[in-house]
Image (cartoon, rainbow, N blue to C red):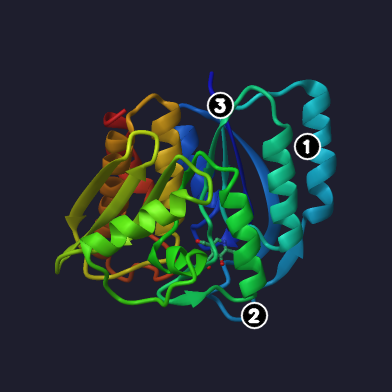
């Protein structure tokens, strides 16, 4: 059985990071090992969230794994709580044998703003982590921050293509920007593969509301698809459709919650596509 290790936080309520990565990747038939970076009562969009840092646990966990000789088909990093945790992620990538696929989702911002607690120094360190990835998948805000570009609500296709090429210059072979909208009522992802100088994209009809955690759902699905042997194009398409379906099911629910989407009931349709 393939095994992915994902490094991100546990937001006990919030439907993001590990509480979506674990069920999604497991449902895709892949063992999911976790490197939990922190335990939060909720994600950081709620006021008054608690935050228990697990930085001190990470090195001992990793060194035990090294002794046991565990290997991974992929390393997928998401929300990291500090610059020190980025350093640990870099070291983990550098010292893990077996050439795992490295996917870095530079989780730190959305809708033009850094998430609570992050600084521009953190952004610079995240760039160093992106250098170690095979694939990075920033949203538009994160791409702008990484590239020191002002955030705008919309970009032209030419601008997106240029940004993707610039993002690959950090060192990854592939960069995929999420939350790209080139036309009204349409949203999706645009990717660039520097290995063969090709672009790939997929768009779906835009749902009427945006939700938290959809980037984590997208990146978890992409990682699961790639490890299951899907092409980049297919993986992007499946991840976009899964997020769209999850939002759609959420909006169908009366009194749906506003902190995360109903990805759980979209899992059966995801599995059929594998
Ligand atoms: O979905 C990204 C994410 C992950 N983890 C935590 C967050 C966020 C976004 O705000 O707060 C704790």
Tell me the CA gap for discs 3 and 2: 37 Å
Among the 4 quarters of the image, the one containing residue 162: bottom left
Mark 2 Cα-neighbour bin, 10 Å: few <14, some 14–19, many ≥20 = few
Residue at numbered disc 3: 73
Please tell me which residue lies in front, 22 or 2: 2
In the displayed structure, would residue 39 be above or below residue 226? below
The C terminus, quarter of image:
top left
Q: Can see residue 118?
A: no
Q: Which residue is rendered at x = 66% and y = 70% of the image? A: 121
Mark 1 Cα-neighbour bin, 10 Å: few <14, some 14–19, many ≥20 = some
The N terminus, quarter of image:
top right
Residue at numbered disc 1: 62
The residue tagged with tag 2: helix, strand or loop? loop
* Residue 208 located left or right of residue 128: left
Q: Residue extending furthest top?
A: 1
Residue at numbered disc 2: 48
Rendering coords of residue 184 (x, y %): 14, 69
Going from the N terminus, do you reach mark 3 or mark 2 first? Answer: 2
Tell me if label 3 and label 2 are in contact, CB under 8 Å.
no
Rendering coords of residue 36 (x, y %): 68, 49
């Amino acid at each position: 059985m393939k095994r992915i290790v994902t490094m991100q936080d546990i937001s006990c309520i919030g439907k993001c990071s590990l509480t979506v990565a674990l069920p999604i990747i497991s449902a895709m038939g892949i063992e999911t090992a976790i490197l939990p970076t922190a335990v939060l009562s909720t994600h950081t969009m709620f006021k008054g969230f608690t935050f228990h840092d697990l930085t001190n646990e990470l090195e001992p966990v990793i060194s035990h794994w090294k002794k046991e000789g565990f290997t991974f088909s992929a390393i997928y990093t998401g929300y990291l709580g500090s610059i020190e945790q980025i350093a640990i992620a870099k070291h983990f990538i550098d010292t893990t044998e077996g050439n795992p696929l490295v996917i870095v989702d530079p989780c730190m911002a959305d809708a033009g703003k850094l998430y609570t607690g992050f600084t521009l120094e953190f952004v610079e360190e995240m760039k160093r982590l992106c250098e170690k990835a095979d694939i990075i998948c920033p949203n538009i805000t994160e791409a702008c921050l990484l590239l020191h570009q002002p955030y705008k609500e919309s970009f032209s296709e030419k601008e997106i293509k240029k940004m993707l090429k610039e993002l690959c210059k950090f060192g990854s072979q592939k960069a995929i920007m999420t939350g790209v909208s080139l036309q009204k009522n349409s949203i999706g992802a645009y990717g660039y593969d520097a290995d063969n100088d090709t672009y790939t994209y997929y768009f779906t009809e835009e749902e009427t509301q945006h939700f938290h955690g959809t980037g984590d759902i997208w990146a978890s699905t992409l990682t699961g698809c790639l490890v299951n042997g899907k092409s980049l194009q297919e993986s992007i398409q499946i991840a976009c459709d899964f997020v769209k379906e999850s939002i759609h099911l959420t909006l169908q629910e009366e009194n749906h919650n506003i902190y995360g989407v109903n990805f759980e009931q979209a899992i059966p349709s995801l599995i059929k596509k594998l």
